[in-house]
Image: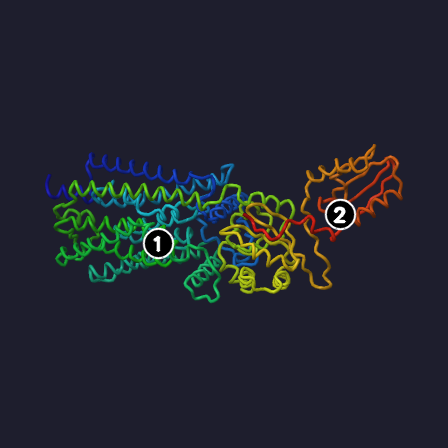
Amino acid sequence: MSATQDDKTVLGSQPSVEDRGERLLHYAIGAASIVLVLSWLQFSLQSICCGDFDGYYHIQWSHLLWEGLRHGHLPAFTWLPLTTLNASRYADQHFLYHLLLIPFTWFADLRRGAKLGTMFFASAAVLSLYWLVLRYRIRYPLLWLLALLACSWSFYIRLSMTRASSLSILFIVAGIFLLLERKYAWLGPAAFLYVWTYNLFVILGVLVVIWAAVLCWSERRIEWRPILWTCLGTVVGFVIHPYFPRNARLFFEHLAAKSGSVSGQPVVGFEWYSLPAWQFLSSALVACAAMVVGYIAFGSALARSRGDRRSMQRPLLFLLFSSFLLLITLRFARFMEYWPPFAILFAAFTLENLWLNKPISPPALAENKQEADATASYQPDGLSWITLGSVVILLSAALVYNLRMTRTTIVTATKGPSHYQAAAAWIRANIPPDALIYDVNWSDFPKLFFYDTSHRYVAGLDPIYLLDQHPELSRLTDRLSHGAEPDPAAAIWTQFAAVEPANLQYIFVGDYPAAPPPEWFNYMMATGKFAVIYRDSDCVILQTLYRPQGEGPVEEIRHLDSPDQRKALLPEVQRRFKGNVYGTDEEDWKGGPALVIHNPQATQDWARRLFSNDANSISGEELWQLGFHLYAVTDGKNIWVTEVKGNPKYRAAFSVAPAQPPK
C-alpha cells in the first residue's frame, strides 16, 4: 500500500469496502453496548429516574402539549400563577424537547413512556460521541468506546434523568463536526434548533468562540463566519419561536439569577452546588485520568509539532473545551452530564495526534478536505499489546464499578412509583378544583403536577421563579423553614391575602428532598391554628384555621369524607337504635349526602330531640367529619331535615397527632 493510500485509510477519505465493513461493525458493537448499558440502568426501577422530579413535569407537559396541539392551540400554563411561569409570562424553554417527547406520551403509563424516551435520547447522545471517534479514524475505537462507557457514574445518573441534556450533547457533537469540517453555514440551523430545545444553547456559542481562538492561534487569522452563523441562528431561534418575546425575557432572567447577579436568591437544587473533592474524583476517576493524559499528550505533541500549529487544531479545540467544562463542573455539579465524555474525547484526539511521528499538515486554509488528506503524511505509532491489555483491564474494572455505583445510587435516591400518588388522589377528591396549595418544598411541584393538574401551586421548577414575582413569599418560605415567624398562620394569611383573592388554606409538606423534623411540626401546630387534614408515609397536608377578626371561621376539610366511610356508619346506627330503626346513606340528595334515620314511630318532637342531642355531642362532629351535609328522620310518610354543622368542640378528636412528621 502506498503512503497516499495509507493516509486515506486513516483520515476517512474514500475508505475501502473492508474498511467500511469494519466501521459498520464498530458502529454495531457501539450501539448495542450503549443501549444495553443505558436500558439496564433505566429499567432498574419503575419510577422516573433518578431522585429528581423534573422528569415528571417534562412528560406531563408533553402530554398536555399534545392534547392542546391536537385541538389547534398551545395550552396555557396555569399551575404556577404566582411565579414567573404564570399563564401570561410562561415560556417553554424546552419546546423542541417536549415535542420530541410526545410520541412517548402515547403509552398508557406516562412513566414508562418517559423512561423509554430518556433511554432513547441518552443512547443517541453517547453514540454520537463514539461516532466522532469513528468519523475521524481515531485508532483503537473499541478502547475509546470502553472509556466513554466507563468515564463517570455521575455522568450516567445525569444522563438517566428525563431531561433535555442528551439532546444538548447531540447539538454539541454536531457543532464540533461542523467546525472541524468548516461547514459554518450549518451552524445557523443547529443554533436555531438548539435554542428551541434547551436553555444551555450558550455552550455552542462557547464552543464556536474557542474554535475562533484556535484558528487565530494556529492560522494567524480571524475567522468570523462560525461566530456570525451561530449568532444569527441563535437570534432567529429566539425571535421565530411560539413564545417570543417571553422566551427571551425568561432566559435572561434565568441567566442573571444563576450568574449570581440577583440578590436574595433562595436555596436552589443540589445540582447548582459543587461536589466535595473526593466525591468528584471518585465519581469521575476515568475522566480525571483522561484529562491528565490529555494534558501530558498535548504538551508532547506540541513539542513534536516543530512549529506546525495547524496540526494541533483538533487537540487544542478539545483541550480548551474540556477544560472549560471541567471548570464549570467543579463549580456546578449539574455539568457532570457534559464534562466526562468530552474529557475522553480530549485524550483520544490528542493521543492520536501524538502517535503521528510527522503531524498532519493540511494546506493553508484546509477548505478542501480531500486535497488536505491527500497531501498529509505521517508514520503511525501506537500502544504495545501489554499496555493496551492493561488499559482494557483497568477500564473494564472502572466500568463495572461505575455501573454498580450508578445502579445503587439511583435505586436509593429515587422515590417509589406510588410516591405522592395517594396524596394527589386525595387532593383531587377533597380540595376544591383550582384552589391554591402552598408546597413549602418547591421541588415537590413536578410530581404533584404529574398526578394532579386540577390545582395550582405556589412554587415549582426553580425557586427563582417565585423570587422574581413575589420575593416576600419566597422570604416567607425561608422564615417558616427556620421557625422564625412568631405566628406562622397569621403570617401566611397576611402575605397571601394580597395576591390570592380566595387566600390560601392548604399546605403540602412532603418528604422530598427530606421530611421536616418533628420540631418544625411542633412549631407549626403550637398555636392551634393548623389542622392536619391528610397524612400518609410520604407527606402531610395542613389546613390553616386562622382568620382575622370579622372574617368568620374557615370551612375545614372533613377528614373522613368519602362514600365508603359514610356507609360504614350505618351498622352503628342499627346498633344504637335497635329494633326496626335503621339508617341509609343518601348520596344524591339535593344539598349533599344525607344520613336518613328510618323510624316508623318517629314524630316531629322525636326528630328534634335527636337533632339537638347529636348537634351538641361528638356524634354531630362525626357526621360532619364523614361528609354528611344533611341529617334526616322519616316515619315513612313525613320527613324532617336539618343541616349538619358539626361541633368544633370535638374537632381535635378527629385530627391526627400533629407532632409526627411523615416517615
Question: Exactly how many numbered labels are in the figure?
Answer: 2
Q: Which mark is residue 606?
A: none
Q: Do we see residue 450 in this rendering? A: yes
Q: Which residue is drawn at 24% across and 54% down?
A: 292
15 or 471: nearer the viewer: 471
Give the SS element for disc 1: helix
Q: Residue 72's spot in the image, x, y percent?
A: 54, 46
Give the SS element for disc 2: helix
Corner quadrant of residue 201: bottom left
Q: Residue 513's spot in the image, x, y percent?
A: 49, 51
* Residue 285 horizontal side relative to residue 83, left or right: left
Residue at the limit of the structure toward the left, as seen here: 2
Q: Residue 36's spot in the image, x, y percent?
A: 35, 37
Report how far apart the C-alphas of labels 2 and 1 lie in the structure: 73 Å
Corner quadrant of residue 494: bottom right
Earlier in the chain: of badge 2 and badge 1, it is 1
Q: Residue 133's spot in the image, x, y percent?
A: 25, 45
116 or 633: nearer the viewer: 633
Give above or below for 19 relative to 188.
above
Q: Which residue is drawn at 37% across and 45% down?
A: 156
Residue assigned mark 1 = 188
Residue assigned mark 2 = 618
Say which quadrant the N terminus sits in.
top left
Q: Which amino acid does label 2 sit on?
A: Ile
Q: Which of marks 2 and 1 is in front?
A: 2
Tag 2–tag 1 contact (CB < 8 Å): no
360 or 156: nearer the viewer: 156
